[in-house]
Amino acid sequence: MNQRKVIIAPSILSADFGRLADEIAEVERAGCDWIHVDVMDGRFVPNLTIGPPVIRKIRKVSGLPFDVHLMIEDPIRYVEAFRDAGADYITVHVEASDGVGKTLEKIHAVGAKAGITLRPKTPVSTLEPFLQKVDLVLVMTVEPGFGGQAFMPDMLDKIEWVRTRFSGLISVDGGINLATGGLAVSKGADVLVIGSAIFKESDRKSFLLRLRKSLPSLSR
Ligand code: DX5
Ligand code: ZN
């Protein structure tokens, strides 16, 4: 049995967009594993962020896997564009279209890893038909749309539900910090998405060391 290394994925939604390349370089130097990119269209969620042109530019400054979380309607329309821009993982919402299965197939067809996610109010059983088709399940622990919200502890049961049925990666997104990261990992999470908790710190390296120390060491 392998010792699990928890993957830390800073969400650049909470970075200084005016210094995006430097912010990414800093968290990469500090020892983070992935870069989480939140894409919002102002329709699926009431906020707008960035799209493929920005991802293409920041792709040049980082060697880390890009974990792209699409909070957009009918994401199949843009799968190719995000892959071309440099996305390694492309995660779509189960609520975002009627063609989730086709969207996941398209993500694989363009050579990316596929992820599925859901809003806090959506029952976790809606993921069941897609578990065989994805590499990653992202459990949202805040309402999608904004960084800096409080972790919803009720969502921990969803992690457990997925863990008993799915052997791929489970990621947790929303309100993760030194107090909540360990709770998610103890339920079976492999990836912690962290926005405001890391970007508000001036010393990202020391934050990361403290975060890793706060996590239980598990193996599976
Ligand atoms: C919310 C996003 C998250 C968010 C996380 O819609 O999907 O990735 O930026 O930020 P924190 O860690 O501040 O909750
Ligand atoms: Zn996200």
Image (tube, grey):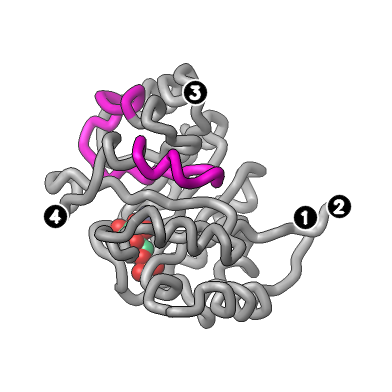
Determine whether the residue tagged by mark 1 lies in a helix, strand or loop: loop
Determine whether the residue tagged by mark 3 lies in a helix, strand or loop: helix
Left or right, 154 with respect to 161, comes to left
Comparing labels 2 and 3, the label whose residue is closer to the camera: 3
Label number found at residue 1: 2
Determine whether the residue tagged by mark 4 lies in a helix, strand or loop: loop
At label 1, the amino acid type is Arg
Relative to 4, say whether 197 is above or below.
Answer: below
How packed mark 1 is, by other alpha carbons closer than 10 Å (few <14, some 14-19, many 20 or more), is: few
Q: Are marks 3 and 1 in contact (CB under 8 Å)?
A: no
Which residue position is annotated with label 3?
108
Q: Looking at the image, which residue is at 51% across and 57% down?
A: 9
- Distance from Cα at disc 1 to Cα at disc 4: 38 Å
Relative to 199, say whether 121 is above or below.
Answer: above
Sequence-wise, the earlier of marks 2 and 3 is 2
The magenta-colored residue range is 56-81
- Distance from Cα at disc 2 to Cα at disc 3: 28 Å
Left or right, 41 with respect to 113, comes to left
At label 4, the amino acid type is Pro
Question: x%, y% of residue 185?
Answer: 61, 66
Q: Residue furthest right?
A: 1
Relative to 41, say whether 114 is above or below.
Answer: above
Q: Are marks 1 and 2 in contact (CB under 8 Å)?
A: yes
Sequence-wise, the earlier of marks 2 and 4 is 2
Q: Looking at the image, which residue is at 29% across and 41% down?
A: 54
Residue 63 counted in the magenta span: yes
At label 3, the amino acid type is His
Which residue position is annotated with label 1?
220
